Image (cartoon, helix red, strand yellow):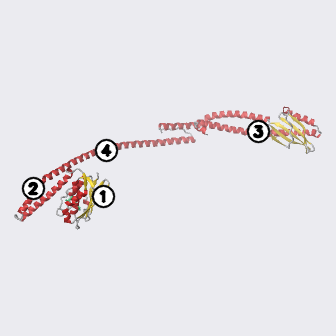
Amino acid sequence: MILLQDLSIKRKLMVIITLTSTVALLLASAAFVTYDFITFRRATLRDVRILANIIGNNCTAPMTFDRPDEATEFLHSLKAESHIMQACIYRQEEDSVKLFAAYTRPDLAELQPPPPEPDGHRFAADSLIVFASIVLKGERIGVIHIRSDLEELHNRLRRYAGIVALVMLAAGFVAFLLSTFFQRLISKPVLRLAEIARTVSNEKNYSVRATDHRRDELGILIRGFNEMLAQIEVRDEALQRAQYELERRVEERTRELQQEIVERKRAESALAEQAKELTRSNEELEQFAYVASHDLQEPLRMVSNYTQLLARRYRARLDADADEFIHYAVDGANRMQILINDLLAYSRVGTRGHEFAPVDLNEVMAQVLVNLRQAIDEKKAEVTLDALPTLHGDQSQLLQLFQNLIGNAIKFHGPQPPRVQVGVVDETREWHFFVRDNGIGIDPQYADRIFVIFQRLHGYSEYPGTGIGLAICKKIVERHRGRIGVESEPGQGSTFHFTIAKR
Ligand code: ADP
């Protein structure tokens, strides 16, 4: 089987047809020869038995009259039957059976008569041995033994072998010729299919078809194959279309993306340009605010001094209206001075900051408490402090930051005396500070607004101030690369959080 596996279908079919017919013929011949062999053996046995009977009958007289020479002479007539190897007559004597007469073919002189045996026969390797009783008037008077060779049987077998071989040769040849012719019926369409399959796989050409209109299983196979090709062709087309569509979409999307990238880059550079412009105008503004507030200080101081002088010198010397007007002028000049100072402080954060250096916040806080002493005492405020770290920053700005937040915490107190807590949490990359109070609190919707310059939630008469303090805090915190925010509810106190980067 394994040997057949790699042969072409053409050879396979030829081998199968030839082999099958040869084996069938061989089996038929074997059956015929076996049948003939058995029949011929039976016929040989029957002939030898008949011969034994005839000889037995003819020898009864010589046996009865004790004439062994006559019996021997009779036996010698068997010379004519060349296949008889030996014939012996045994006579029944009182208590034994004795050899009476014998004949042995001349070429077998050394063949001795065998001892008598009971009736029967057996086939030896080269001969048939028969023993039969000699009966006279119903009485067994002796035994006859005949041994016949099987030469004829063997000759016959040899002849058959020759005939079978010749027939096999001729039949094998005819089978070969027929198989060469008939195998095409099967192999041709299969080979054509194989060729088409090769074309399809090599050239990826699914439009080829096998043509055959037979109605057998091969026809079904070919039609199935064609149908399969048609389906593959349809799918291949669909696949190619889908691939083309996909490629087109990818191309389109790539183009869009490239366009987007270009636009985004353009927008980014415009944004960067705007940011640069903004920084520049911011710096200019800061510079302007600084210059303006700085330059305004001098004339304002003069206005303030002279209105105060006016107040001191002319109070109660003019009429009541004049006193009131002078009071407003003094008050206005003072507030303006405070405003100008705060504005100056605000513009200084960006433009006049100091180099960063290690700052011990405990020292800073001690100074803050000294600066706020008056307010603390007035409001009976209690300020508690955690142990504070030493960090890298602008000392005077950090002082301003804490002072503004603690100052606000005292200023915006509720009915209770102010309680202010300053704490810090180490958050690895930055310090997280908080300033908590028990004051009036802030509506969360204003949590962002209060850090914008001039934004205040109260009137000046209620809580004095300029609305610049928290804007300054925000600027200082951002200069220290941190964030600031507030957590609060009206009436619940406020907690201002801010961070300072460690490096
Ligand atoms: P100012 O204190 O001069 O009014 P700020 O910028 O310091 O200006 O504060 C802005 C506003 O934020 C204040 O007017 C006040 O309404 C609110 N605010 C600030 N700190 C507190 C606080 N601790 N408790 C309640 N409100 C506060």
Which mark is first along the chain, 1 or 4? Answer: 4
Alpha-carbon neighbours of circle 4 within 10 Å: few (<14), some, or many (≥20)?
few
The quadrant in which residue 18 appears is: top right
Q: Residue at x 30, y 58 (%)?
A: 425
Alpha-carbon neighbours of circle 1 within 10 Å: few (<14), some, or many (≥20)?
some
Q: Give, as a three-letter code, the residue at label 4.
A: Ile
Q: Are marks 2 and 1 in contact (CB under 8 Å)?
A: no
Whether residue 230 is visible: yes
How far apart in space, not on screen, are marks 2 and 3 (Cα)? 159 Å
Which mark is first along the chain, 1 or 2? Answer: 2
Q: Give, as a three-letter code, the residue at label 1.
A: Val
- Outermost residue, left direction? 317
How far apart in space, not on screen, are marks 3 and 4 (Cα)? 102 Å
Please indicate whether residue 36 sits to the left or right of residue 220 in the image.
Answer: right
Q: Give, as a three-letter code, the residue at label 2.
A: Met
Q: Are marks 4 and 1 in contact (CB under 8 Å)?
A: no
The residue tagged 4 is 261
Q: Residue at x 6, y 62 (%)?
A: 313
The residue tagged 2 is 302
Q: Which mark is residue 37?
A: 3
